[in-house]
Image (cartoon, rainbow, N blue to C red):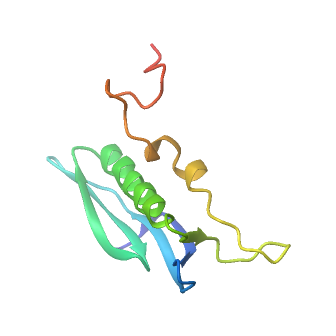
């Protein structure tokens, strides 16, 4: 990939205590007449994938959503995604996935809404 529009370095800690360097990144958006694409990377966890869609906005949001769900799944069963630097108190700080990905971690309700009030007109 030639470049990234968003990138964060993290440390992935598995339930057995094994740690590895990780990187969460979304590649440059490429928009064509028929299809838009971008590469999404979760280094240390899985191979890069190419997200495809009808517009650059769609692939950007879907790429971020894929990252949010994959990292959220990873943090189950005692696994952690932490910042690489240790805090002032010497303890690791978890990456706040809910704050970072927000509504992208939620699935829509039966009416296709992501929040109770629906779109505000």
Residue name at image x 60 percent, y 49 percent: 99
Residue 30: name its quadrant. bottom left
Instruction: Answer with left or right where residue 63 lies relative to residue 15.
Output: left
Task: From the viewer's side, name the closer residue of 87 and 51.
Answer: 87
Residue at position x 56%, y 69% in the image = 81
- Counting from the top left corner in percent of width and height, residue 57 is at 35, 44
In-image side of 57 versus 99 (left or right): left
Give the residue at x 42% y 54%: 64
In percent of width and height, residue 4 lies at 44, 66
Q: Quadrant of residue 48?
A: bottom left
Label tally:
0
Q: Nearer the viewer, residue 73 or 26?
A: 73
- The residue sitting at 51% across, 50% down in the picture is 101
Q: Residue furthest right?
A: 89
Q: Position of residue 121 (x, y in %)?
A: 45, 13
On screen, residue 5 above or below 47: above
Q: Is residue 93 left or right of residue 113?
A: right
Specify the farthest residue to the left.
Answer: 34
Q: On the rendered image, what quadrant is the N terminus found in?
A: bottom left
Residue nearest the viewer, comparing 56 with 113? 113
Relative vertical location of residue 59 with respect to residue 117 in this rendering, above or below: below
Asked if residue 86 is positioned above or below residue 76 in the image, the reply reads below
Q: Position of residue 53 (x, y in %)?
A: 23, 48
């Amino acid at each position: 990939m030639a470049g990234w529009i968003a990138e964060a370095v993290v440390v992935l800690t598995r339930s057995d205590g094994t740690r590895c360097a990780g990187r969460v990144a979304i590649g440059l958006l490429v928009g064509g007449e028929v299809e838009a694409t971008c590469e999404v990377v979760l280094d240390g966890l899985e191979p890069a994938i190419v997200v495809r869609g009808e517009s650059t906005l769609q692939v950007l949001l879907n790429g971020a959503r894929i990252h949010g769900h994959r990292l959220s799944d990873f943090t189950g069963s005692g696994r952690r995604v932490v910042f690489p630097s240790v805090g002032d108190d010497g303890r690791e700080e978890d990456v706040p996935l809910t704050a970072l990905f927000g509504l992208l971690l939620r699935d829509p309700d039966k009416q296709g809404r992501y929040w109770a009030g629906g779109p505000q007109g």
